[in-house]
Image (tube, rainbow, N blue to C red):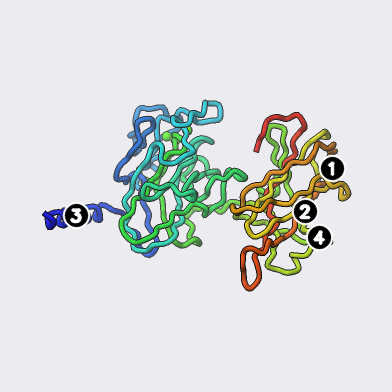
Amino acid sequence: MKNITITLLALFATISLSAAFQERDGFVEIEAEDFESQTESDVRKWYIITPGNQPDLQDIDENHAESASGKAYIEILPDTRWSHDEKLITGENFSNEPGIMGILHYPVQFETPGRYWVWVSAFSTGPEDNGLHIGINGTWPESGRRIQWCQGKHKWTWSSAQRVEHHHCGFPKTIYIDVEEPGLHTISLSMREDGVEIDRFILVNDKAFEPEGFEMPDLETMFDEQISRNGNIRLGFTNYEIKGKLPYYRDLGKGAYAIDASSEENRKGFAAASTKFPGPNGKYTLRLKALTEIDGESTYRVILNNDTLLMEFQNPETKVDLKPNNVSSAAVELKKGDIITVESNAHTNGKIPERGGTAWARGRWQNLTVIPVGNTTSGH
Ligand SMILES: [Ca+2]
Ligand SMILES: [Ca+2]
Ligand SMILES: [Ca+2]
Ligand SMILES: [Ca+2]
């Protein structure tokens, strides 16, 4: 009996192995339409689309198979939400949680364990067909959630960016999967938005790799732009090396201003960034989004016209690195052209050993939002 079991197991392993995709030299590319199986498909289901062939279900965009790799792609249908005007119904046309609906499985044989960055090629037409999740062996690590496409509408576009609260388009190379050991693993895709179209995806253990045709977005613009939404204004800070103050640098990966605390000079005093209030004149509160850091508790200040302190606070101690700490000022009258300055310092709490000393928090903050008094719309 035992022998038969072993034989059957060996046979099963052989069959699985032959059907599996094969990673070699830290790289595997998979046509999305070559999935092995699909689960949780009663509300939304993935269909294989080929030239002239697609299901008779609600779908506002055209067939894009001619330009797809292998002349085939997958789409999750029906697509009942294609703009902000249709109602978002979690569990029907949207799932911010992975592993709930529309799950595809791809067996992959890995030779090389390690961290794999994920690149997925999608065709997005609108704002509500550009999100997806990826997981491994039935788990959905945070680093595989909310793959987002922003650029490259109306064409097949590669993304490896994770949608994050402070920057919806995300940053390239923030989606990854850790493969703990060699052997057969199941990679799974899971729906975030209906109407998503996927052609193929790549897992690669080289962070420097970029697929052909990928265009690196200009990440600096998110710091520069003034963004108005629902009456709230997120200020852009282009002046962040101010004479007499320590300089900031832009930490693109974290979407934050930060102080280079590796230099001892930058541990003495405050760094500053300033901007001009674009108006309109009125009464506002200012909300600074600081980031907590485990190695120190930085102090933050917001100053009006170089002489009036609008707020000052110190980050709380934290066990969670880079958690947003939103702090608002009292109401203040602002006029167009007023100079608004944000300052912060590097700080060590002496708790995290690093190179013979202790690590320093970098005074990180992401943005400053100006909110009209009486405005109840939170915006972001
Ligand atoms: Ca379509
Ligand atoms: Ca949709
Ligand atoms: Ca679509
Ligand atoms: Ca394909």
Label 4 near label 3: C-beta < 8 Å?
no
Label 2 near label 3: C-beta < 8 Å?
no
Distance from the alpha carbon under mark 3 to that under mark 4: 68 Å
Looking at the rendered structure, the kind of residue marked 3 is: Leu
Q: Is residue 174 left or right of residue 310?
A: left
Residue 79, image x, y percentages? 44, 30
Distance from the alpha carbon under mark 3 to that under mark 1: 74 Å
Q: Mark 4 or mark 1, which is nearer the start of the sequence?
A: 4
Mark 3 crowdedness (10 Å alpha carbons): few <14, some 14-19, many ≥20? few
Mark 2 crowdedness (10 Å alpha carbons): few <14, some 14-19, many ≥20? many
Q: Is mark 3 within 8 Å of ligand 4?
A: no
Residue 334, image x, y percentages? 84, 38
Q: Is residue 167 left or right of residue 193?
A: right
Looking at the rendered structure, the kind of residue marked 1 is: Gly
- Mark 1 or mark 2, which is nearer to you? 2
SS for dot 1 = loop
Q: Is residue 36 left or right of residue 256?
A: left
Query: Which label is found at residue 343?
Result: 2
Looking at the rendered structure, the kind of residue marked 4 is: Lys
Q: Which residue is mark 4?
A: 245
Please report the residue visible at 82 percent of the width from the left and 34 percent of the height from the top.
Answer: 283
Q: Mark 2 or mark 1, which is nearer the start of the sequence?
A: 1
- Residue 332 seen: yes
Q: Which residue is mark 1?
A: 337
- Mark 3 or mark 4, which is nearer to you? 3
Q: Is residue 146 above or below residue 229?
A: below
SS for dot 3 = helix
Label 1 near label 3: C-beta < 8 Å?
no
Q: Which residue is mark 3?
A: 9
Looking at the rendered structure, the kind of residue marked 2 is: Glu
Residue 88, image x, y percentages? 51, 29
